[in-house]
């Protein structure tokens, strides 16, 4: 076998020859690169999963035994090709827990969160020794390596949305998983031992405070009250009144790889179009409306879930003249920002600061003018 190109050999034959040597010439990527002068191609497609469909699947899952980790859940799989999750970075799904059930304790390098659909004070997740109640629309974060087990001590089914960064952790081969060894972890008994006692604005000065691995419950009653407080503001031209679930210690992203938002669309609001390199998954908490994504139209109402892929122009519309719409969303923007890859158009629509000067900017400016 030789690595030199034979006289008279076509380029296709030479490519085959290189392939046998487990090599590939740069020229084979030329056709792909010329498609990218307007930025990355979206991964997957915009898609909506209706509440009725999800409820039926949850119902059917109750007839089968929960899996070895005692979790009955499914993932919303993007129907677009090549996406092994809801987006290439996020897996959004739904989970159901029957009265008396325990989803056994474990931990992993995957960051995860739960947004509660049907909850109660006696539905809860224990995270690193603390009991965090799961009432309707609460958000519970379980950062990487926190022990967590879910308990349903109520008399009705508990249902929540799960959102995890598992697709990207899997792609990077960074998944560690460890069962606790019993279904239930012991709970801490005094507030001084609570991890969450380190997340208030007054906290022990003798301890390190740089950990991002703080389990936390964002109670919906507080979030909904804040949305009400800001309801009269103009908000973002692209998202209406949108509130960020700030990290309880750093004030930064909700999780290292995921940011969460609650947004209120006033009756009759039509937002302006924008696009960003992050992809976003949504759960409709209240009301109904439409999200236009590229050429796709997603008509949604309470209980539906939908996805906007990366770098697609989109806008939200609340058609109702009298009823507010409220959306919960999660995005992979912190992951992209950490890599210096987060972009949005129009620039700075999220107030994230100046757009970095990169060659792609020059190319895009050249193409569009
Ligand atoms: Fe887990
Ligand atoms: Fe957006």
Image (tube, helix red, strand yellow):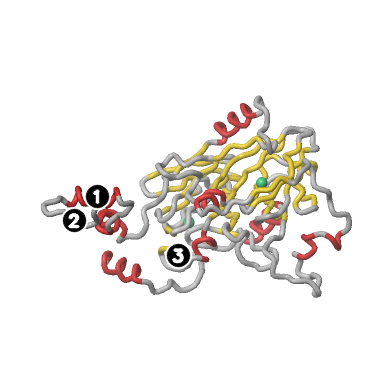
CA–CA distance in space, label 2 to label 1: 8 Å
Do the residues under discs 2 and 1 have CB atoms within 8 angstroms? Answer: yes
Look at 67% across and 64% down and name the residue there: 212
**What label does residue 341 carry, if any?**
3
Q: Nearer the viewer, residue 79 or 148?
A: 148
CA–CA distance in space, label 3 to label 2: 38 Å
Estimate the x, y position of residue 30 in percent, counting from the top left.
Answer: 26, 57
Q: Left of 50 or right of it: where is 246?
A: right
Q: Nearer the viewer, residue 116 or 60?
A: 60
Q: Left of 95 or right of it: where is 133?
A: right
Estimate the x, y position of residue 237 in percent, counting from the top left.
Answer: 48, 61
Mark 3 or mark 1, which is nearer the start of the sequence? 1
Mark 2 or mark 3, which is nearer the start of the sequence? 2
* Label 3: element kind: loop
Q: Few, some or many C-alpha atoms within 10 Å of disc 2 (few <14, some 14-19, many ≥20)?
A: some
Estimate the x, y position of residue 130 in percent, counting from the top left.
Answer: 80, 53
CA–CA distance in space, label 1 to label 3: 36 Å
> Mark 2 sits on what residue?
5
> Mark 1 sits on what residue?
17
* Label 2: element kind: loop
């Amino acid at each position: 076998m030789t690595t030199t190109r034979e006289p008279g050999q076509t380029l296709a034959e030479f490519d085959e020859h290189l392939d046998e040597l487990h090599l590939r010439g740069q020229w084979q990527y030329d056709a792909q690169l010329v498609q990218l002068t307007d930025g990355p191609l979206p991964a997957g497609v915009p898609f909506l999963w209706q509440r009725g469909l999800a409820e039926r699947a949850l119902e059917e899952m109750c007839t089968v035994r929960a899996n070895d980790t005692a979790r009955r859940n499914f993932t919303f799989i993007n129907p677009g090709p090549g996406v092994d999750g809801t987006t290439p970075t996020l897996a959004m799904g739904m989970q159901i827990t029957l009265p008396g059930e325990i989803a056994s304790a474990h931990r992993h390098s995957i960051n995860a969160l739960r947004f509660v659909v049907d909850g109660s004070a006696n539905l809860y997740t224990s995270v690193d020794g603390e009991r965090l109640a799961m009432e309707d629309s609460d958000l519970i974060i379980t950062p990487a390596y926190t022990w967590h087990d879910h308990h349903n001590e109520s008399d009705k089914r508990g249902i929540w949305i799960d959102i995890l960064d598992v697709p990207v952790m899997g792609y990077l081969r960074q998944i560690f998983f460890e069962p606790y060894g019993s279904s239930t972890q012991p709970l801490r008994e005094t507030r001084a031992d609570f991890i969450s006692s380190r997340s208030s604005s007054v906290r022990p000065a003798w301890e390190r405070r740089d950990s991002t691995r703080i389990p936390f419950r964002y109670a919906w009653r507080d979030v909904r009250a804040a949305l009400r407080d800001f309801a009269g503001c103009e908000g973002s031209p692209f998202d209406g009144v949108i509130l960020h679930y700030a990290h309880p210690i750093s004030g930064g992203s909700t999780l290292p790889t995921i940011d969460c938002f609650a947004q209120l669309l006033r009756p009759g609001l039509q937002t302006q179009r924008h696009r960003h390199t992050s992809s976003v998954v949504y759960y409709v908490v209240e009301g109904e409306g439409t999200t236009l994504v590229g050429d796709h139209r997603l008509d949604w109402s309470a209980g539906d879930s939908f996805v906007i892929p990366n770098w697609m122009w989109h806008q939200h519309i609340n058609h109702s003249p009298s009823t507010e719409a409220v959306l919960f969303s999660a995005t992979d923007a912190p992951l992209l920002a950490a890599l210096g890859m987060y972009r949005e158009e129009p620039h700075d629509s999220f107030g994230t600061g100046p757009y970095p000067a990169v060659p792609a900017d020059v190319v895009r400016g050249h193409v569009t003018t």
